[in-house]
Image (cartoon, rainbow, N blue to C red):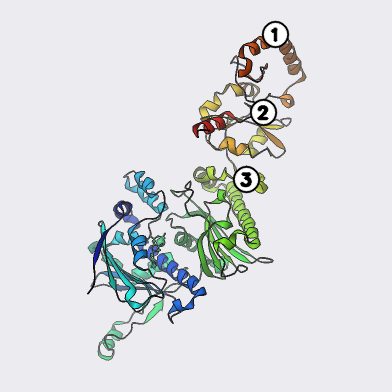
Amino acid sequence: DTVKETLGFQAEVKQLLHLMIHSLYSNKEIFLRELVSNASDALDKLRFRALADDILYEGDESLRIRIDYDKDAGTVTISDNGIGMDREEVIANLGTIAKSGTAEFLANLSGDQKKDAGLIGQFGVGFYSGFIVADRVTVLTRKAGMPADAGVKWESAGDGEFTLEPQTQDSRGTTIVLHLKSEEKEFADAWRLKSLVKKYSDHIAFPVEMPVEKSPADDEEDKTERSADEAVAYESVNAATALWTLPKSEISDDEYKSFYKHISHDFSDPLTWSHNKVEGKLEYTSLLYLPTRAPFDLYNREAPRGLKLYVQRVFIMDDAEQFLPLYLRFAKGVVDSNDLSLNVSRELLQNDKAVESMRGGLTKRILDMLTKLAKDNKDDEYSKFWKEFGRVLKEGPAEDYANREKIAKLLRFSSTHDDSGAESVTLDDYLERARSEQKKIYYVTAESYKAGLHSPHIEIFRKKGIEVLVMHDRIDEWMMSHLNEYAEHTFQDVAKGKLDLGDVETEEDKKKQEEVEKQVEPLLTRIKDVLKDDVEAVRVTHRLTDSPACLVVAEHDMGVQMRKIMEAAGQ
Ligand code: ADP
Ligand code: MG
């Protein structure tokens, strides 16, 4: 006799289910991609674990995914002979959402279905997407290597609770039965399912099989000649070759896009991609993507990042973060190495020479991809990228000293040249407009673009027609502390130290200034006497044209913005 238990979903799951069912209606067919993607992941995991312990194959090494349907019953069934789940895993994976930041993410949804649909796409819908088309979902699963009676049956109507009961299952793996809503019965159809597999899952690395369709004449024959429990014949309906192993010339844009969706958990199209085979001392293939939109957890330290790692086409791990620097964490993709050992672990990746060199190569690829995107800026694509990920890229000069010139070229700034305040000016733009004798790139840091524009420090620059970059993002000043120069021009914070406009001033200007300095010498001494230790120095400045005085920090002191950040952090 079986013990049936009823458990409640975690609050976040309830919320997500509700939102998904209501806002993803026009994308409902993605459920198949998500479930096939999970099945493929389960096969990958089994193959990986079986490297060390081939008992897990239980004598059946032909890994595959199957899709069955029953028009009369109104069901679609997706099954795999992958790793399967035990009871604890079922509860954790199909009852909760483990992603950190989920609660905040959900709290930020607007209730506007169109907007929310996009956001949920970035969040990743996964298993729960089955409930877009089904009013009941049954999961039958048994973990590889466990006895038949370790099977688990999970069932839910997506309304807040699920039931669990033990069951006996001879073959390992997971079967998901979608009991279609009455208005979604059209999915229980061979043609419809096949075209969805072709569209979304053609190049996952495993065969997706469907029952061989019989002509009506065969059907008649069937009834008389075959016994009822005779096995159904299956045929593969997808290409079943890992996309990255194919030559570029054989891959269409649509195939690249759907593969992105399979690996990224994002359902918008990628912005661009780069597919490369490296041969020589190291051999590896990489397929790298830049997303169109930032995921909800881009700034979350624990958020998964990195590439999907394969070794000789065998899946090894997700989120292999050793292959990319942190400031490129928005990139997604696959790297398949011929040099690493199949036994490689996260720990081993950390001090591996080959990995280090691959990381250098992959970093270069992404920077090149960005450089090209910026150069073409077709349909404003680079501007879109900058809006979503510019802040992350700003971490680059600090993290990746060797590539700082390349990164600097990719940066976009607000400046006194463009009144909109948008971050649109490149350092090359700036230098192109600068006078040939100008040796510095001037910038001001401020709380906002407006504040920067009205800073007394830039009065003299305005008067002389010298462009000043306006840094108004919190991270800017910190970033600038790691960028000393660009194209042989040093950076100069206009609020720091003694302002030397020597290179852009005439002899006459200089003479005049020296005279003024002499004249006010006694005044300076008096001011210094009054302010005493509150200031380091009192100087005559030529940087002001309208304001009578301004505060300046010493050349090597922390900037004003940085001080504010430190103060806010309680330092
Ligand atoms: P994700 O795939 O992003 O992890 P999902 O919601 O799609 O999120 O799936 C949640 C988890 O449920 C998976 O990480 C996996 O552990 C488990 N899971 C889902 N489907 C299967 C399956 N067919 N076989 C084994 N485990 C599965
Ligand atoms: Mg998934």
SS class of the residue under badge 2? loop
Q: Residues within 10 Å of mark 3 (few under 14, many from 20)?
A: some
Marks 1 and 2, how far apart at CA: 25 Å
Report the front residue among 166 and 364: 166
Q: Nearer the viewer, mark 1 or mark 3?
A: 1
Q: Quadrant of residue 222?
A: bottom left
Residue type at the position of mark 3: Ile
Counting from the top left corner in percent of width and height, residue 223 is at 25, 87
Work out whether mark 3 precedes mark 2 in sequence or the reverse, and give the earlier one. 3
Residue drawn at 45 percent across, 50 percent down = 295
Q: Is residue 96 visible?
A: yes
Q: Is residue 404 above or below residue 496?
A: below
Report the front residue among 322 and 373: 322
505 left or right of 261 in image: right
Tell me, for residue 255, which label it has, or none: none
Q: Is residue 491 above or below residue 58?
A: above
Marks 1 and 3, how far apart at CA: 48 Å
SS class of the residue under badge 3? helix
Report the front residue among 540 and 131: 540
Counting from the top left corner in percent of width and height, residue 20 is at 32, 54
Residue type at the position of mark 2: Glu
Residue placed under numbered mark 3 in the picture: 407
Counting from the top left corner in percent of width and height, residue 271 is at 50, 52
Residue placed under numbered mark 1 in the picture: 522
Residue drawn at 77 percent across, 19 percent down = 507
Residue placed under numbered mark 2 in the picture: 555
Q: Point out the residue furthest to the bottom here.
A: 225
Q: Residues within 10 Å of mark 2 (few under 14, many from 20)?
A: some
Mark 1 lies within 8 Å of ligand 1 (Cβ measured): no
Marks 3 and 2, how far apart at CA: 25 Å
Mark 3 lies within 8 Å of ligand 1 (Cβ measured): no
Q: Is residue 133 above or below residue 109?
A: below
